[in-house]
Amino acid sequence: MRSGIAILLLLLTVTGSAQNLTGIWRGKRTQGAQGCFPEYGLELHIYFSNEQTIMGNAYTYVSKEQYVKTLFTGRYNPQTKRLVLIENSVLSYNVPASCIPCIKTYQLSFSKQGKEPTLDGQWTGHEMGNKNACIPGNITLHMEPQPIFPVTIPQSDSLALLQQKLQLKQREKEVVQTLKLDTSLIKIDLYDNAEIDDDTVSVFLNGALLLYKKRLTDKALTLSINTMPNTDYELMMYAENLGRIPPNTSLMIVTVGKKRYEIRISSSEQKSAVVRFRYDL
């Protein structure tokens, strides 16, 4: 089940104090008596769309095999350092037959214990599929360098539905460049590399469709990406045609902080060009 929220870009650019919360948070979620389990693992993958608005995924789990994955949005108040996160939908789950996933609301506070960032608070919620209240509990999370669960590439509903219907030809991947990043924020501009000849591309990030059959011109197609730390990313250019002058060529300008990379890319009906990047804390 997918939320109706239109997520136009994969991981949107963030600024200011909210940026400190972007990343992987992991710890414990307790539940009072008569809950399915007295304690769960909880892993939040937090992204921001601006300084105050939050989006991401939550994994509640007993083991890596028994989990509930949800989509959440929320608000952050940088003055009070309080967060409110609201789960919008359950994306996938595997739980015992006697358990019903909870759709949760989190009330959390951000703090630092020494140098370690911490989120503490409570949660409430109701059972998936009805309004029966779940037994509430407490939450304690710490920022972690690496996730247990896969980092999702968010898409708009329209692109997700479109990708389900796509039948791409199998092509060899050619790695054009690998970038080591010193900041999580990336801006990618795509242009036609030579004469504008109707080159058309689709762009995928870690297999998720971000741009579909977009014509390359002298005006940039722009993606703003906020990468999660210690996560490998693979941006693939899939040639939808070869234009009037084969092969399909493009210029990718990657802006990372004060650094700027110009990458010339060529794709064909046999090969898809790939740029890899990673931000290590």
Image (cartoon, grey):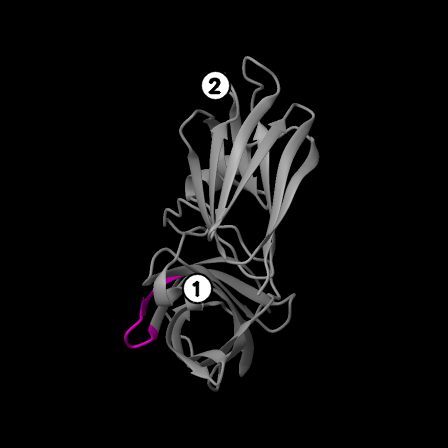
Name the residue: 65% across, 65% down: 65
- 3D distance between C-alphas at marks 1 and 2: 52 Å
Question: Would you call the spot at circle 2 few (<14 residues within 10 Å), some (14-19), or many (20 or more)?
Answer: some
Residue type, numbered disc 1: Met
In the rendered image, residue 176, in percent from the top left (x then y), is placed at 65, 37
Q: Which residue is mark 2?
A: 196
Q: In the drawing, what numbered circle is on residue 10? A: none
87 lies left or right of 41 = left
Q: Bounds of the magenta span?
A: 72-82
Name the residue: 37% across, 61% down: 54
In the image, is residue 128 above or below residue 238? below
Q: Which residue is mark 1?
A: 128
**Mark 2 residue element:** loop
Name the residue: 54% across, 81% down: 39
**Mark 1 residue element:** loop
Q: Is residue 259 visible?
A: yes
